[in-house]
């Protein structure tokens, strides 16, 4: 029996519907998954100001701090991180190479989807711009907030790239770097030209002539937004998430990248008959992450089942999982589907990491979210049982320390 | 080809060719004879074949029998001889064979549309195909009656082997095009209805002729069932894939005791081998000889399954080949057997050759005349340079009832 | 590592001290010694060796080497023969009891590469059709205007040539087109004559202007110069004669696609130096009212070949057919060649028609089409006469790498599977061991693959010396 919570109201920055949690409190749970792979029993989670202060086994809680003791069946996991979603976003994108565009420009905080998202336990979303080719940059948001900036955790998390076995797709990528080179060369010439003029100006003794030769302050070339994006890739301030469908696409991707060095991760579009297994070794060697869906594929031409997430994981690739269906219903079914993949051979701790810390790392926000560690945001989900069992319900969702869904008893 | 004439030609005035009806005898020496008996000899090396009056008089190793006096000798050197090939699913003896007037057209006959020894048949003859079952199309559930005929005679009466050659039943999806909203349930109902009517008709006539009943009214469309009930002709069934073939076997062979053979047997039909054997239903396979993996329906775990392989694996003893000409050109009948062998059928007991000769002949009820080199059968002989299934083998001569109807030394090579 | 230097104890000492010296002081010792240490190391790291051992090698040049070895280095054939030295780390495939043929060349293909016109950027190297084509023995194919290798698993080193087989039209169905083409040839021909004259005359008269190239078709110039050969599509006797005459008049060698009535005018075509691309089983009838010969003939390839026309054979369908009717698509290229043999073409010419002849027409014969030193290591290993209908490709090698293994793929592994004892390509041997003895022992019964090979009473699938089949 749940006892409704009665607390003194503390001024909270965001108005709530659900009963509030205090600014400082502790959660006691029989089982807590940290998201790093560690599972803590008799766990104590201390939250203050929306952040995790400390988490550990059988910690002593100072007197006066409200303690919420969970049922022995209940399990605490970090808030789920979906690195590749457009739930909450509408509109279709354009195709082509527009790497300067931002998904953040499309954010619509009042979208009704977000409350549904919260209820499923997903606490961090990576919104990508829609469209083919290179449609732009992803933004990482929390599914709560009345303004875009309130929602935004990080912008320009990655550059979305769709790669295929075609000259146009490959040129979009390799051509982008060439554009950067061209721009750099032009800029260099521009500077050289100015330098020469300045030199001449400096040398000139005659005051009249000198006045004429004054080149003025240096005017750099106008930014080429496309070139700028690729230069950002080069200097590491931007990374990419590149989608492929087939093993052939992957080989063409590597060919298109050529000698360029930049940070990127791989996403494999899941279809029923897949041949990506041909390049699992190569992908594992490259050290890139792979974004997959928790789905059993069939070996082409047969009914033989292949657990691609498990195969990639076994080969040493860091795996990120996203829901099969990009919808609130899909988010609800996400843990159950991951559970099926675990039952078919995916290592359980890898699976937990694949929906929490690994996607957070892919999004570059693993310093803030993705796991229950001291200093990170207090994003966690209280489940009625094992996260990967089909019948498990979401009892409560806490986002930035605040209860956003469900109930927690005293 | 060396022609050696012996003396004592008493019939100098006779214009009859040796081996033909009324003519002197013919003796052929061949390096190898593919005898293809149903349950006996398959091959005779260094064979001597005696042909008289259009029939095979004797066949044995050269050392075992003598050439009777007056017989013309033809030494075929290193060439082989085999029986003429039989194709039980063809549509090229004529055209206009899909009169789908009703859904059941049991009274229609292709016989009147036949053009004997037409271009297609001539080319097929050059490939060794001597007898075909010419049947209606599959536009309706019962397309009509086919005829068994020889490919090399230009006169209809001489070419005709048997009319009715078969009753063509198509149980597949082609007939659904006949009627809007029509499916398997309705088609099988109609088939059963007509078959029951037909069998009752046959019984009534049998009783009348035995003096036990009144004279029934004559119905042209049901006459064929008298032939079927008396097992004087068979049902050639256009049927393929598992469920369909199962129905063909159970409904036609088991329930109604008709002589039936499968006349396509593609895809996963071979899964029915056991009930086919039980109910004496042969598998005459073509034009598809192979099934590609296509899960979830056709599950082969990625393997390519030959139809002949499939039936043979399950122990079916009567496997034949057809072309469904013009889908596969009639002259490529031997290639169908080659493909059956290629894609897994064990060919160590001459199964490919048998599937082109004695199996279809037996199944069509004409093995008393055709399908193997045995005394008393028609002298329909194919003289060739080697393995009949091998595309590289060339056919030099074809005899029909002792008459040289194709000879590359005399005619232009047609195939 | 077996580095053979001057064999005495001093070598050992040097081997120990050398690295120390190198790291301490400037090289005071001979460059040669240093090289001896370093060179073998780099060579063995970068060179990829591959050897097919023990098979009967049908080189395609007329020579057959039984129980021999083909050694390839970095994808190119390095040596063919007996008792070859196989470098350490080489991948060795024992093919005793099997035959090795040049990879087949398809001058027409559809859908093999999975991509579009720009193969290097659009090929799907894992495409099912490519695997099936390799299963049928095809290792080189033309797709559009590019000719490429079926390098399964790779997207580089693919395209051998492009812009090939340009088409010209010269048919009686378009008299004005014919006239235009003739005029172009005449103009180009005249230009060449004028140019040649100018070369002579300008020696005496320096001021003489070079003849103008304006209005001269540059591709026609290439044909007249012998730099390229035009492709015509023609099947009727009159068209064929006209093309032959055009070719003889202006001095080029035409390629004729279709060529169904070629057998009627074979001599003319032979004199014109024509090459034919044909399908042996093409059927067309002559008009009933014609008295003279007409229509197609199964003897077309044989008659053309005897008249000196080079023959390339293609199947009636250039793609891979998965409908279930087998024998007339690219997977059955050898069947089509078999039908040409039926018509009288020699077995050697039939094999040439699907290997070296199409390679020549596409300008890639210096790389593929036969097994010769210096050519690409593109070969197929079969369990019998490649033109026999029951023969399967057991392995396909492209650029010195096994890209297809019948036992490793699911399609045909269950059909007359290889005996267990046969070595798989993964096994590697060190050069020091003597592989011959070991392999012969294990693969003793792989002389002809297993039970399924005793078809008939020896009447088919026999392993004759090159003349295959059972022809008298």
Image (cartoon, coloured by chain):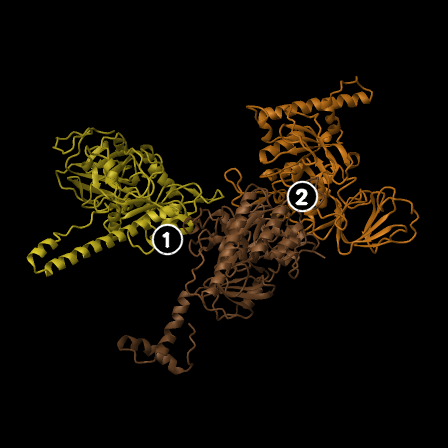
**Viewer can see residue B65:** yes
Q: Position of residue B355 (x, y in %)?
A: 69, 44
Q: Is residue B190 above or below residue C29?
A: above
Local SS, label 1:
helix
Chain shaded yellow: A
The answer to whether the residues at label 1 and label 2 have Cβ atoms under 8 Å apart is no
Q: Quadrant of residue B97?
A: top right
Left or right: residue B237 versus residue B398 is left
For this rendering, which residue is in front, A7 or B220? B220
For this rendering, which residue is in front, C367 or A217? A217
Q: Which residue is mark 1?
A: A255
Chain shaded orange: B
Which of the image's four quarters has the C terminus of chain C?
Answer: bottom right
Q: Position of residue A367 (x, y in %)?
A: 21, 47
Q: Which residue is mark 2?
A: B333
What chain does badge 1 belong to? A
Q: Is residue B195 above or below residue B341?
A: above
Per the model, the C-alpha gap separating discs 1 and 2 is 49 Å
* Colour assignment, chain C: brown
Q: Position of residue A283 (x, y in %)?
A: 36, 52
Q: Are marks 1 and 2 on the same chain?
A: no
What chain does badge 2 belong to? B
């Amino acid at each position: 029996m749940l006892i409704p919570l009665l607390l003194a109201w503390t001024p909270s920055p965001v108005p709530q519907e659900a009963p509030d949690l205090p600014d400082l409190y502790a959660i006691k749970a029989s089982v807590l998954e940290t998201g790093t792979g560690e599972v803590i029993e008799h766990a104590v989670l201390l939250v203050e100001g929306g952040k995790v202060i400390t988490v550990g086994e059988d910690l002593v809680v100072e007197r006066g701090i409200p303690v919420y003791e969970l049922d022995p069946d209940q399990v605490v996991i970090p808030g789920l991180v979906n690195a590749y979603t457009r739930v909450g976003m509408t509109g279709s994108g354009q195709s082509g190479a527009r790497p300067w565009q931002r998904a953040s420009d499309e954010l619509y905080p009042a979208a009704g989807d977000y409350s549904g998202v919260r209820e499923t336990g997903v606490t961090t979303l990576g919104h990508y711009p829609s469209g083919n080719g290179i449609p732009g940059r992803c933004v990482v948001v929390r599914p709560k907030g009345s303004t875009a900036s309130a929602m935004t955790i990080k912008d320009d998390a990655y550059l979305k790239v769709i790669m295929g076995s075609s000259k146009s797709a490959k040129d979009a990528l390799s051509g982008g770097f060439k554009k950067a080179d061209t721009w750099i060369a032009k800029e260099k010439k521009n500077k050289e030209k100015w330098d020469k003029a300045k030199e001449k100006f400096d040398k000139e003794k005659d005051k009249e002539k000198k006045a004429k030769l004054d080149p003025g302050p240096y005017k750099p070339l106008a930014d080429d937004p496309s070139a700028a994006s690729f230069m950002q890739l080069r200097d590491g301030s931007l990374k990419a998430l590149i989608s492929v469908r087939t093993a052939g696409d992957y080989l063409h991707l590597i060919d298109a990248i050529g000698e360029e060095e930049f940070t990127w991760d791989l996403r494999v579009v899941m279809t029923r008959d897949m041949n990506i297994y041909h390049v699992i070794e190569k992908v594992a060697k490259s050290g890139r992450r792979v974004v997959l869906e928790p789905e059993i594929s069939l070996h082409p031409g047969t009914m033989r089942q292949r657990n691609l997430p498990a195969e990639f994981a076994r080969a040493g690739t860091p795996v990120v999982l996203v829901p099969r269906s990009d919808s609130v219903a899909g988010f609800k079914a996400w843990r159950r589907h991951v559970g099926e993949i675990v039952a078919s051979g995916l290592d359980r701790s890898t699976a937990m990491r694949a929906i929490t810390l690994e996607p957070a790392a892919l999004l570059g926000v693993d310093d803030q979210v993705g796991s229950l560690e001291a200093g990170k945001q207090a994003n966690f989900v209280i489940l009625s049982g094992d996260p990967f069992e089909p019948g498990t319900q979401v009892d409560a969702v806490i986002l930035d320390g605040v209860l956003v869904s469900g109930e927690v008893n005293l | 080809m060396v022609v050696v004439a012996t003396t004592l030609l008493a019939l100098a005035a006779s214009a009859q060719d040796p081996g033909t009806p009324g003519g002197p005898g013919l003796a052929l020496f061949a390096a190898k004879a593919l005898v293809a008996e149903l349950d006996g000899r398959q091959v005779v090396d260094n064979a001597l074949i005696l042909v008289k009056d259009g029939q095979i008089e004797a066949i044995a190793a050269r050392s075992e029998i003598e050439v009777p006096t007056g017989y013309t000798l033809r030494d075929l050197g290193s060439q082989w001889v085999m029986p003429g090939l039989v194709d039980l699913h063809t549509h090229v003896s004529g055209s206009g064979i899909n009169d789908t007037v009703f859904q059941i057209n049991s009274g229609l006959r292709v016989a009147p549309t036949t053009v004997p020894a037409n271009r297609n048949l001539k080319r097929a003859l050059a490939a060794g195909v001597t007898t075909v079952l010419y049947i209606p199309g599959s536009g309706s559930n019962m397309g009509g009656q086919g005829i068994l005929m020889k490919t090399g005679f230009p006169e209809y009466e001489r070419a005709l082997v048997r009319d009715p050659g078969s009753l063509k039943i198509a149980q597949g999806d082609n007939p659904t095009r006949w009627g809007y909203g029509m499916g398997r349930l309705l088609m099988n109902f109609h088939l059963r209805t007509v078959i029951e009517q037909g069998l009752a008709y046959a019984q009534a006539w049998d009783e009348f002729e035995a003096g036990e009943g009144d004279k029934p009214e004559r119905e042209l469309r049901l006459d064929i069932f008298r032939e079927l009930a008396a097992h004087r002709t068979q049902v050639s069934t256009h049927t393929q894939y598992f469920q369909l073939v199962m129905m063909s076997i159970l409904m036609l062979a088991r329930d109604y005791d008709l002589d039936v053979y499968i006349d396509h047997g593609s895809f996963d039909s071979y899964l029915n081998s056991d009930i086919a054997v039980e109910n004496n239903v042969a598998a005459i396979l073509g034009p598809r000889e192979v099934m590609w993996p296509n899960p979830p329906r056709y599950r082969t775990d990625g393997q390519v399954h030959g139809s002949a392989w499939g039936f043979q694996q399950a122990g079916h003893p009567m496997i034949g080949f057809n072309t469904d000409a013009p889908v596969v050109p009639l002259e490529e009948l031997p290639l169908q057997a080659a493909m059956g062998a290629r894609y897994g059928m064990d060919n160590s007991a001459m199964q490919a050759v048998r599937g082109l000769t004695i199996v279809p002949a037996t199944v069509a009820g004409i093995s008393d005349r055709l399908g193997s080199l045995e005394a008393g059968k028609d002298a329909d002989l194919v003289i060739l340079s080697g393995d009949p299934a091998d595309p590289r083998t060339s056919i030099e001569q074809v005899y029909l009832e002792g008459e040289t109807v194709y000879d590359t030394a005399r005619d232009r090579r047609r195939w | 590592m077996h580095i053979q230097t001057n064999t005495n104890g001093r070598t050992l000492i040097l081997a120990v001290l050398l690295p120390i010296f190198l790291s301490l002081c400037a090289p005071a010792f001979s460059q040669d010694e240093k090289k001896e240490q370093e060179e073998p190391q780099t060579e063995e790291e970068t060179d990829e060796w591959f050897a097919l051992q023990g098979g009967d090698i049908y080189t395609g040049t007329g020579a057959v080497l039984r129980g021999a070895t083909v050694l390839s280095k970095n994808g190119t054939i390095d040596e063919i023969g007996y008792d070859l030295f196989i470098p350490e780390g080489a991948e060795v495939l024992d093919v005793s009891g099997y035959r090795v043929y040049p990879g087949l060349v398809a001058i027409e293909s559809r859908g093999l590469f999975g991509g579009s016109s720009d193969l290097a950027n659009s090929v799907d190297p894992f495409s099912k059709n490519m695997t099936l084509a390799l299963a049928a023995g095809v290792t080189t194919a033309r797709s559009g205007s590019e000719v490429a290798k079926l390098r399964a698993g790779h997207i580089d080193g693919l395209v051998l040539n492009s812009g090939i087989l340009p088409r010209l039209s010269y048919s009686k169905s378009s008299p004005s087109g014919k006239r235009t083409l003739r005029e172009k040839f005449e103009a180009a021909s005249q230009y060449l004559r004028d140019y040649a004259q100018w070369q002579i005359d300008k020696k005496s008269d320096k001021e003489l202007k070079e003849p103008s190239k304006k209005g001269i078709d540059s591709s026609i110039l290439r044909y007249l110069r012998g730099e390229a050969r035009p492709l015509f599509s023609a099947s009727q006797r009159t068209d064929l004669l006209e093309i032959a005459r055009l070719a003889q008049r202006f001095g080029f060698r035409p390629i004729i696609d279709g060529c169904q009535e070629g057998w009627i005018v074979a001599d003319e075509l032979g004199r014109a130096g024509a090459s034919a691309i044909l399908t042996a089983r093409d059927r067309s009838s002559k008009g009933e009212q014609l008295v003279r010969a007409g229509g197609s003939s199964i003897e077309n390839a044989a008659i053309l070949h005897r008249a000196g026309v080079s023959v390339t054979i293609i199947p009636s369908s250039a793609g891979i057919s998965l409908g279930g009717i087998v024998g007339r698509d690219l997977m059955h290229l050898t069947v089509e060649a078999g039908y040409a043999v039926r018509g009288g073409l020699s077995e050697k010419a039939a094999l040439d028609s699907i290997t070296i002849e199409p390679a020549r027409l596409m300008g890639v014969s210096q790389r593929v089409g036969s097994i010769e030193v210096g050519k690409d290591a593109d070969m197929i290993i079969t369990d019998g006469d490649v033109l026999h209908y029951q023969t399967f490709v057991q392995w396909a090698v492209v650029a010195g790498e096994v890209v297809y293994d019948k036992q490793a793929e699911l399609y045909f592994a269950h059909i007359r599977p290889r005996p267990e004892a046969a070595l798989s390509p993964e096994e590697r041997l060190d050069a020091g061991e003597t592989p011959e003895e070991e392999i012969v022992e294990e693969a003793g019964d792989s002389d002809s693959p297993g039970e399924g090979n005793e078809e008939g009473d020896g009447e088919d699938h026999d392993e004759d010396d090159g003349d295959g089949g059972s022809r008298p």
